[in-house]
Image (tube, rainbow, N blue to C red):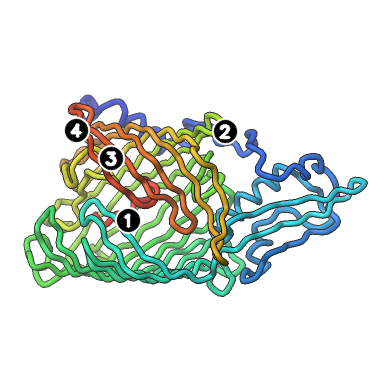
């Protein structure tokens, strides 16, 4: 009992949300949703589909679209099913707009899906903002829809806070199998200002997610990580650490979409082995729980709650290197706190955020380039706990509040412009973040 007696109640509530299925905000797929279709489909529910046409596919193969559709020719039309199809098609992030039209004559429906494709290849400036290294930018090339198969290939080079080269390949399908994958390789050369050491590292990572039901999935991931440093004290082996990792877990995902979700719940439980019987000087296990809730309060106001728990079974400096320490503070972890204000081998991060739609998702066309954007205003509270002790929860939490504007962009996710402050002192800090914060905090370098 002594272990939990001094733990803040908020952390216990977050753990309940993380581990107990069905707890918290309702995520029923049958809840009423805003009408996302044109008005000519509203009265066609239950009518038989005579033809189903796809229009505007120039680069995209038809099978990429059809595997997302539940409607078939000679089947019955459903407005609710069509709305879900529209969200899935937009979530592919290869179309700037998706429209579904119905022509209904004597109870027979001619169904049309109309698409505006985003460019198959996009040269751009790659920008990355981390709490540890600050801003880095450089030339990059992305194929959002390689060979028209909804395969995303990205080549990044970034300079500034860090020198980084990255190549990645991802897709929600492997051929006809619903296996989502993400494979990447990177090389980083940077100076860590928090621990004052220079690192040169290489990573080869992979992750596969097999969805064996609409909500449940099994994931398997791994990584080969090698790091050298000019400060041998941060390593387990002074000449360089090779750390292989292998992890497995379960995912429960009822979000209406992966990008810019408005309703639903994402939960992930994962256990990862680093080193040990896999080889290398490291030997520790990590228990990870990731929870994200999205719930609409009205047509323009949404509630977002997120919690991330990472606990390492091992001793820092003996079983895991100092380069694997968590640093908390800044736009990607705890807004209102200085970068690296908190550190430890274990962490809990909690966020509760209200989002107001300032400008709804709007498709645009510049020359021959299609895209979309949206703007949200946000107001939120968050807290963090970071610790090295063997207790499973921290004994102290650090709260903060923040407000800001988020710009949602095609192919980027979001850019966050935010003002944050500690709760104890009104020390307002402005910061900029890239990607949704639960995503950024999960996959930040440190």
Point out the residue furthest to the right here: 106
For label 2, the crowd category at 10 Å Cα-Cα, with few meaning under 14, some 14 to 19 and many 20 or more, is few
Q: Is mark 2 on a helix, strand or loop?
A: loop
Point out the residue furthest to the front here: 367
**Circle 1 sits on which residue?**
272
The vertical placement of 336 against 187, above or below, is above
Q: Which of marks 1 and 3 is in front?
A: 3
> From mark 1 to mark 3, how far is it between C-alphas?
17 Å
Q: What element carries label 1?
A: strand
Q: In this view, does 368 lie to the left or right of 276?
A: right
Looking at the image, is mark 4 or mark 2 earlier in the sequence? Answer: 2
| Quarter of image, res 112 | bottom right
**Circle 2 sits on which residue?**
299
List x then y, in percent, for residue 238.
8, 68
> From mark 2 to mark 3, how far is it between C-alphas?
31 Å
Q: Is mark 3 on a helix, strand or loop?
A: strand
Looking at the image, is mark 2 or mark 1 earlier in the sequence? Answer: 1
**Circle 4 sits on which residue?**
427
């Amino acid at each position: 009992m002594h272990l939990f007696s001094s733990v803040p109640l908020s952390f216990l509530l977050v753990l309940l949300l993380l581990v107990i299925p069905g707890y918290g905000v309702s995520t029923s797929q049958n809840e009423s949703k805003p009408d996302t279709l044109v008005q000519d489909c509203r009265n066609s529910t239950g009518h038989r589909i005579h033809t189903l046409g796809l229009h505007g596919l120039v680069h995209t193969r038809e099978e990429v679209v059809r595997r997302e559709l539940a409607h078939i020719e000679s089947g019955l039309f459903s407005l609710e099913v069509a709305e879900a199809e529209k969200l899935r098609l937009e979530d592919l992030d290869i179309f700037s707009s998706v429209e579904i039209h119905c022509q209904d004559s004597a109870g027979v429906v001619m169904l049309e899906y109309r698409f505006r494709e985003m460019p198959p290849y996009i040269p751009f400036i790659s920008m990355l903002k981390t709490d540890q290294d600050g801003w880095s930018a450089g030339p990059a090339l992305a194929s959002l829809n390689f060979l028209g198969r909804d395969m995303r290939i990205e080549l990044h080079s970034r300079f500034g806070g860090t020198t980084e080269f990255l190549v990645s390949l991802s897709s929600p399908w492997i051929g006809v199998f619903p296996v989502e994958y993400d494979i990447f390789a990177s090389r980083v050369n940077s100076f860590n200002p928090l621990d004052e050491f220079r690192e040169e590292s290489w990573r080869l990572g992979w992750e596969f997610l097999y969805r064996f039901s609409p909500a449940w999935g099994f994931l398997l991931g791994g990584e080969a990580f090698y790091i050298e440093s000019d400060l041998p004290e941060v390593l387990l082996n002074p000449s360089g650490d090779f750390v292989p990792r292998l992890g497995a877990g379960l995912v429960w995902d009822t979000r209406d979409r992966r990008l810019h979700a408005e309703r639903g719940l994402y939960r992930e439980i994962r256990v990862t082995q680093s080193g040990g019987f896999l080889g290398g000087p490291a030997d520790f296990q990590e228990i990870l729980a990731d929870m994200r809730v999205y719930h609409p309060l009205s047509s323009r106001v949404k509630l977002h709650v997120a919690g991330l728990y990472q606990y390492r079974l091992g001793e820092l400096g003996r079983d895991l290197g100092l380069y694997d320490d968590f640093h908390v503070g800044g736009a990607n972890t705890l807004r209102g706190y200085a970068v690296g204000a908190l550190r430890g081998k274990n962490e809990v991060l909690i966020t509760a955020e209200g989002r107001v739609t300032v400008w709804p998702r709007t498709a645009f066309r510049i020359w021959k380039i299609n895209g979309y954007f949206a703007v949200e205003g946000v107001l939120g509270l968050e807290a963090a706990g970071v610790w090295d002790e063997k207790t499973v929860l921290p004994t102290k939490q650090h709260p903060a509040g923040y407000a800001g504007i988020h710009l949602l962009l095609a192919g980027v996710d979001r850019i966050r412009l935010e003002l944050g402050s500690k709760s104890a002192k009104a020390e307002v800090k402005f910061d900029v973040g890239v990607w949704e914060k639960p995503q950024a905090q999960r996959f930040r370098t440190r």
